[in-house]
Image: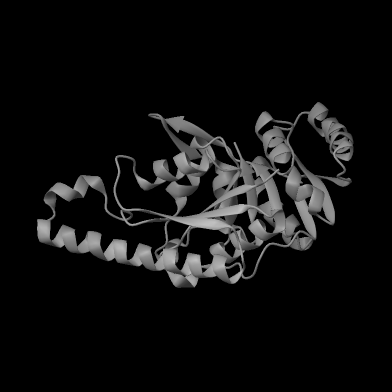
Amino acid sequence: MIKDILVKLERDAARDGVCEYAVSVAEMFEAHLTGVAFGNAGIPSFVMPDVPSDVLANVIAENETVARKAVDRFEAAIKRNSIAGESRLIVDGNAGPPDALALLARRCDLSVVMQSDHAGGAHNDLMIEGALFNSGRPVVIVPYIHKGGATLNRVVCCWDGSSTAARAINDSLPFLRRAKAVEVFIVANEKTRVEREIRGADLARHLARHGVKVEIEITPAADIDVASIVLSHAADLSADMIVMGGYGHSRLREFMLGGVTRGILETMTVPVFMSH
């Protein structure tokens, strides 16, 4: 059940599509929506000692002003759509924005974050990693090209038999129950054992007990092509959402995205529901 949603607000009004998407999900589940903006974003701590105090003060003030404008737009959106919600503006604190987002996400059922647009100067990779790996909660990543609210005509669930994939599919059940069509998609390659393919049928029976009728599709592909195969398949089906496990590995106690996860997030064109 999804009753408490967190959305990371964007500084640029042109990226408010993530807010529109989160509002529509809150409407779908009659959920409370919290919007959080960070006034302390974009200032690497390691450069602070080398920045003149007056320059640093101006940068901080400008960032806070931009964040407040994002909060104002969010509050107007929830009022316009009669959504129960609240806003948070974080301008200081010991934790950096990714850690602060993860702490807030732990107290919600779902977080919503927009995809990075590196060419456009919008970098959310660390925010996504924080929400995915450090919150213990699922996250929906919304493509920066996405327009409009959430639709669930067809959902593609990626399945490889792993615990991470199982967690993602279980966490996404509220969405799957509302979807008109759900497909379990298995990419068979040298890392896929035969019994994992058989488990696709077991998974279908499990989901049926939750009122979710699924189709199963198995396609062969090299391990290096998994991300492109998934995205191509979702595009062919005109899927509205991809559900998948979020994979990564730890380096010096900081998570880094795995290859397939990173590939999906770099080139995604539909919202992706992820759990770790």
Colour pattern: one colour
Q: What count of labels does the image hold?
A: 0
- Residue 255 lies, in percent from the top left, at 46, 36
Residue at image x 86%, y 45%?
212
Residue at image x 30%, y 62%?
63
Task: Say which quadrant the C terminus sits in.
Answer: top right
- Residue 245 lies, in percent from the top left, at 64, 39
| 60 and 145: which is toward the camera | 60
Task: Say which quadrant the N terminus sits in.
Answer: top right
> In this orientation, does residue 89 appear?
yes
Residue at image x 21%, y 45%?
46
Q: Quadrant of residue 235?
A: bottom right
| 165 and 18: which is toward the camera | 18
| 263 and 252: which is toward the camera | 252
- Residue 231 lies, in percent from the top left, at 68, 55
Residue at image x 53%, y 39%?
107
> In this orientation, does residue 114 appear?
no
**In the image: residue 113, left or right of residue 164:** left
| Up/down of 52 relative to 192, above or below | below
| Up/down of 37 relative to 94, above or below | below
| Up/down of 14 relative to 124, above or below | below
- Residue 268 lies, in percent from the top left, at 61, 58
